[in-house]
Image (cartoon, helix red, strand yellow):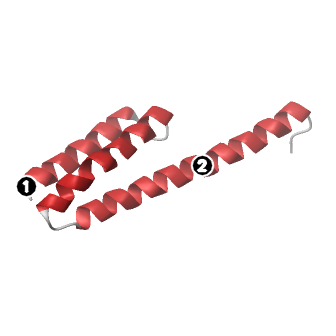
Amino acid sequence: MANHKATKKDTRQAAKRRDRNKYYGKTTRNAIRDLKTLGETSAYTDKLPSVESMIDKLAKRGIIHKNKAANLKSKLAKKKVAA
């Protein structure tokens, strides 16, 4: 356990950030899952930009790597074309 005041604060901040990052990641994963289950092309096309924006925000915050974000967006865009 941390003994210094600053280290205790750092531990609290890290826990807060971890919870926030977990929330953003899970919310985005759920949005991607919901998008993949949409059958209609029009609904898919309408919802795709918001999901891509969520993915970009995850990469910007450092929750996921920028290449992973690019791969996710690429796969979702391909699915749109194939649908």
Q: Nearer the viewer, residue 13 or 3?
A: 13
Say above or below: 50 vs 67: below
Quadrant of res 13: top right
Q: Secondary structure at mark 2?
A: helix
Residue at image x 8%, y 50%? 81
* Quadrant (top left/top right/bottom left/bottom right) for the N terminus: top right
Q: Position of residue 21 (x, y in %)?
A: 55, 47
Q: Nearer the viewer, residue 21 or 50?
A: 50
Residue at image x 69%, y 46%? 16
Q: Position of residue 59 (x, y in %)?
A: 42, 36
Q: Give the residue type at disc 1.
A: Ala
Q: Nearer the viewer, residue 40 or 74?
A: 40
Say above or below: 30 vs 80: below
Residue at image x 77%, y 36%? 10
- Badge 2 crowding class, 10 Å Cα cut-off, few under 14, some 14 to 19, many 20 or more, is few
Does 38 sit left or right of 25 as displayed? left
Quadrant of res 44: bottom left
Q: Secondary structure at mark 1?
A: helix
Quadrant of res 54: top left
Residue at image x 44%, y 41%? 58
Distance, label 1 to label 2, CA atoms, is 34 Å
Q: Mark 2 or mark 1, which is nearer the start of the sequence?
A: 2
Pointer 1 with pointer 2, Cβ within 8 A: no
Does 26 sit left or right of 54 as displayed? right
* Quadrant (top left/top right/bottom left/bottom right) for the C terminus: bottom left
Q: Position of residue 2 (x, y in %)?
A: 87, 40
Q: Give the residue type at disc 2.
A: Arg
Give residue 8's mark. Answer: none
Say above or below: 29 vs 49: below
Does 80 sit left or right of 11 as displayed? left
Query: Which residue is the site of mark 1?
Result: 82
Give residue 20's mark. Answer: 2
